[in-house]
Structures are given as structure tokens and as C-alpha cells.
Image (cartoon, coloured by chain):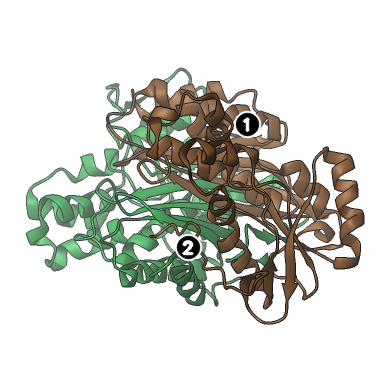
Chain colours: A brown, B green
């Protein structure tokens, strides 16, 4: 199959993906759109590499596509923004079946449709391993744009969901593949393979002036909270880490420490935020009423630097480092 | 070096790269900017892969960085737009020296400064080969946005520069590395390693309503003109192919066919356009007065489909196919 043939098939596949805001879509030198007036634009990029983030044996092509887009959408959510469009730079080894590539695009397309994110263009090239570098552009009202550098001492640190499920799923997929068929492992595997970006939550939290800083938990709570603190010039104490039921279920199967997965495990793609203390209870009650699940307080922001446990122990940032 | 250390060093390196339009830059979940009102936004993505597009032996790191950004800026130029910002998704093998990476960013930064393109963010991950997937966002007035599907029968087909130099440089670098020190090969090697995107020319041509279609020559005139024709539902006849002096110089060293390099060789990153016939002479005269070099007529648009030579022979699209 030639490059032009493959691009034509991809384009057919993506024809119905919310493209009403695109003036020029796939097939030209660049895609074009009309930004909403009086809004800010945001852009993020995130790559998935075969053998580093996934294997073709352990993950279906549609799951790989979903996961690549989800990681980017999670960054858009963390800014308080909504997605507008995505581009896909795809590297393919010679042994990669075109059917695998099209199924991978189906995974991207299914999530893109739900997220109302157009697929605007891309690039296809040879590469030694399957490589998906996605970029997503989003939009947000200036007043709703959230950064990670606004946390203040006294704030409540919170997350939008319990943690550790994705790390538990990765553990099963990589270390205990024989357990992949166990019903108890299914929710963790789903969390790992098809994480759900918190787009609605991000926009809702973005609209609250009491949310002073926000980011997503892509590299683990310990690493990401340390980054939020460093950006804000503050420290934090972690009092309670909400552990996902899916992580507990796997931990009881394999006698592992679900608490450690929740504290250090990456790619849960929940939102991590710093909330003005006096507003937290009311915000959390409204969050629960709106989304039907809790906004979990995990600790509070302090003067100084570094992240510690309630007993005073420093937490090493043992989460994911892309270069280790 | 950890991911956070490397990102901190990259960020330092890029601190002065035209970032005045960024509201949020490198280091947050996403970058943010304010689009100019009443303009359209454009986005393009293009990847360079070690072993496919370059080798660390044959190209300096700053040249790799320059080339990756230049390929994307060329697509922005082809839309009639100017660049606003770029993101960089970088894949690094374990054997890649941090100094190499920082020098590569110096190459990106030097071109970005000249092009007034901010480096807004990125992603760093492990990969089996050095992989640079860049995305560039640009802006253009709605009336100046050029697509590749507007060519009409009778139009003059033109290019913004003579062709074949990049292919001649690639030939020297890959097939005749012993000649890389020859003064006669230097201009071709420079065209291959540090191509200059036609940003000023693209904006100038974008402002002319007589330019009905435009794209860049990234995969070779034969391939790219066939794409422009297919998008526009027309055919074309090629009458004269302007051959770059740099390509002729290499061809005479190695007894190769400079004409074939000019017709089929990729990555010259010139602009290919379709111009209303009655306006061409005036446009070309103004182009020469403005830029000090000619706008080359290469042929004309016909009814039907396919690209032929003046003698009636069909031209096979023998240019670059990223998947072959």
C-alpha cells in the first residue's frame, strides 16, 4: 500500500468525526479552522511508542489509538479547556499490517467522536517501531484557563477519582499475562488500555475560581504533585490516597501493594487540583451532585517545598520518568 | 539525566524564542495563546525519523532540528499563513547523548527565532530511534488561505525556486560521502541539510487572489503536482523544469541526471502554485522585483487528469513515498 492509498483510507474512516468546525481537513498541507472569538487556544502533544508504552501483543490496535488520544485529551481537560481538533503523526514499521493501522484509527475516531474532537490531519512515515505522536488543540475562556502554578499554602489538594487502576492493569498485562482473563483483573486492564479523559470534569472545574491550580495525573500522584508544588513554589502533605477498587482487586489476586500503585502509578489520567480551603466542601458537594462521584481530598498545600506524608516522611517521586 | 532535568534544560535554551504571544509556555499540561481575531488558524504535523530521514553520522544535531522545523514551516507557508508556535514530540534512544539533544534544540531554536515561531511545548519519551514529530500552528486572513484544490484548466503552474538541490545533497550524503568535502557539493548539501522554508513567499503569494492553489514540493514535483491536480480534478502538462545550479554541480561531479532530480527529487520545500493565466506575467514580475529571483513557470493546467510532459509522455510519480 502506498502512502497516498493509506491516507485515502484513513480519510474515509474519519469522514464523520466532528469536522464541522474545520475549514480545511485531511489532505492539504495543513488543516484550517476558525477559532472562537474571545477564547484562548491551547495545544498539547504526547507520543506513544511501541515497546515503551505498549506492545502489539498486549494491546489491541483500537486500544492503542484510544490511549494515544486519551493522554492528549487529559492534558486539554487539565487546562479547563475543550478539544477542537487533533493531528496524528504516525510512524510505521514495515511489518505493520494496514488493517492494524486502520483499526488503530477506529480507536482514535471512536473517542474523538465522543469528545467532539475533529481529526484534522497528520503525517505517515516509516519508523522502527509503531509511533503515534498526537497533538490536540483546544479552546477555553480566558477566565477558565487553569495552570499548575497557582497553588497557595492552605489549599486542599484533591483528585477527581481513585488512583492506581492503570498501574494495576499494566502490572497484569506485563508481569502476569496469565491473569488477563480473570474477571477481577478486567476493570484494571480497562483502566490501563482505555482510560477515560476527564473532559467534563476539567471544564466544570475550570469554571470555578476556587480551583487555583490543576494538572492531570499522567506520571503518578507522587511525581505529579511534586511538579505542581515546584511550579507553584509550595510544598504539600498527602493525608489520604484514594485507592481504586480495580487496583485493590488486582492487588488481592497477586499480593501486591495497591496503596503504592495509587501513590506512584502513572496514567490514571485523573485531574489533580489545588482548591481554596474555605470553598472545598461546597465545591466537592456540587461535584458529587453533578458527576455522581466524589471529589477526593488527598491532602493540603504547605509553605516550603517537597511532598511529605502526614507522618512527616518525604515521598520520593517514584512515578513514571519517560527517560528512565 | 531525568526527564524533568532534560525538560528544564530545553526550557532554558528556548527562553528567548519569540514567546510574547504565549500565555502559558513549556512546563504546563498544555501551552496557551490568544489567536488574532478575525484570522483563521492552521495546523500541520511532520515527523523526522533517524534511519529513515537522517542518520546521526551524516547530519549534525542542529541540522536535524532545523530540518524538522523547516518541513513543518514549509507547510504553513503553503497555506499562505505565518507560524505562531510549534510543539516538539521527541523520541530518544538510550544511547543518545543529552548534549546531542540540546544541540538539536539549538537548530530548532535558531530557525524558530528567524521565523518568529514560539516553541510552546512538547513531550520526551524513549524510542528505538531518534524521532522528532513537530506540529506547527499558524494564522492567516481568511481571504489569503490557500488550498491545493483550486487549480483550473488554463492556469500557469509555477514554482518559487529551481529544483533538485536537496535530492543532489541527499545523493552525496548517502551514496558518495567521500565527495561531501568538495566545494561543488556544498550548496546541494546545504539545501538537503538546512532547507529554507518559503515563509515570506508564501504570505506574499497568499495575498494574491490570482493564486488559485498552492502546496509545497516536499515529495518531488512529479508527485506533488499529481496531488495538486488530483485535489483540483484537473491534469497538467510540464514544459520546463528549472534545475537548481547546486544540483547541476553535483550531477557533473558524479555523471548523474540533474533533470531527474529536479523532476522527482523531494524536499526542496519550494512552493508549487497554480496561477490565473492572464495574471501570471504581472505576478511573476512583481515577485522578481520583491524577492530578487524569478517565479518559474513550469507548465499549465489542463482538463482531464494526470501529469504529462510537453511531448505527451505521462510522468510517473516517481517522487518520495514515505511508506516505500
- Read off the residue under disc 1: A111
Q: Indicate the quadrant where residue B116 lies.
A: bottom right
Question: Horizontal placement of B149 versus B185: left or right?
Answer: right
The mark total stands at: 2
Estimate the spatial distance between the alpha carbons at disc 2 and disc 1, rounded to whole Å: 47 Å
Residue B145 in the image, given as x and y percentages of width and height: 63, 45
Frontmost residue, A69 versus A215 = A215
Tell me the quarter of the image containing the C terminus of chain B. top left
The residue at the far top in this view is B304
One can see residue B14 in this view: yes
* Up-down relation of residue A147 to residue B172 (above or below): below
Question: Which residue is depicted at the point 64% across and 47% down?
Answer: A243
Q: Residue at x 54, y 21 (%)?
A: A12
Write the residue at 88% across / 54% down: A283
Q: Position of residue A275 (x, y in %)?
A: 81, 63
As drawn, B145 above or below A22: below
Q: Residues within 10 Å of mark 1 (few under 14, many from 20)?
A: many
Q: Which residue is mark 2?
A: B291
Of the numbered discs in the image, which one, if any, rests on residue B102? none
Nearer the observer, A220 or A21 = A220
Asked if marks 2 and 1 fall on the same chain, the answer is: no
* Image position, residue A149 (x, y; %): 70, 70
Amino acid at each position: 500500500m502506498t502512502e497516498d492509498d493509506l491516507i485515502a483510507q484513513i480519510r474515509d474512516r474519519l469522514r464523520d468525526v466532528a469536522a464541522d468546525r474545520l475549514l480545511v481537513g485531511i489532505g492539504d498541507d495543513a488543516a484550517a479552522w476558525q477559532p472562537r472569538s474571545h477564547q484562548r487556544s491551547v495545544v498539547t502533544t504526547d507520543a506513544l511508542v511501541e515497546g515503551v508504552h505498549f506492545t502489539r501483543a498486549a494491546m489491541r490496535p483500537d486500544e492503542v489509538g484510544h490511549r494515544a488520544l486519551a493522554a492528549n485529551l487529559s492534558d486539554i481537560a487539565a487546562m479547563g479547556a475543550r478539544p477542537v481538533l487533533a493531528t496524528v503523526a504516525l510512524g510505521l514499521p514495515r511489518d505493520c499490517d494496514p488493517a492494524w493501522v486502520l483499526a488503530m484509527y477506529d480507536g482514535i475516531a471512536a473517542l474523538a467522536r465522543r469528545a467532539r474532537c475533529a481529526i484534522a490531519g497528520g503525517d505517515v512515515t516509516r519508523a522502527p517501531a509503531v509511533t503515534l505522536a498526537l497533538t490536540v488543540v483546544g479552546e477555553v475562556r480566558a477566565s477558565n484557563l487553569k495552570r499548575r502554578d497557582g497553588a497557595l499554602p492552605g489549599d486542599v489538594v484533591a483528585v477527581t477519582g481513585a488512583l492506581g487502576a492503570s498501574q494495576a492493569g499494566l502490572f497484569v498485562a506485563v508481569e502476569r499475562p496469565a491473569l488477563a482473563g480473570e474477571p477481577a483483573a478486567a476493570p484494571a486492564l480497562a483502566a490501563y488500555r482505555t482510560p477515560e479523559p476527564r473532559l467534563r470534569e476539567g471544564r466544570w472545574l475550570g469554571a470555578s475560581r476556587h480551583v487555583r491550580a490543576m494538572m492531570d495525573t499522567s506520571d503518578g500522584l507522587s511525581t505529579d504533585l511534586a511538579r505542581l508544588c515546584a511550579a507553584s513554589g509550595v510544598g504539600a502533605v498527602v493525608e489520604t490516597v484514594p485507592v481504586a477498587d480495580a487496583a485493590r482487586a488486582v492487588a488481592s489476586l497477586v499480593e501486591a501493594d495497591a496503596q503504592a500503585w495509587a501513590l506512584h502509578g502513572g496514567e490514571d489520567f485523573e485531574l489533580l487540583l489545588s482548591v481554596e480551603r474555605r470553598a472545598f466542601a461546597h465545591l466537592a458537594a456540587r461535584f458529587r451532585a453533578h458527576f455522581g462521584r466524589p471529589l477526593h481530598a488527598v491532602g493540603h498545600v504547605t509553605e516550603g517545598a517537597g511532598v511529605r506524608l502526614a507522618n512527616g516522611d518525604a515521598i520520593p517521586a517514584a512515578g513514571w520518568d519517560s527517560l528512565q
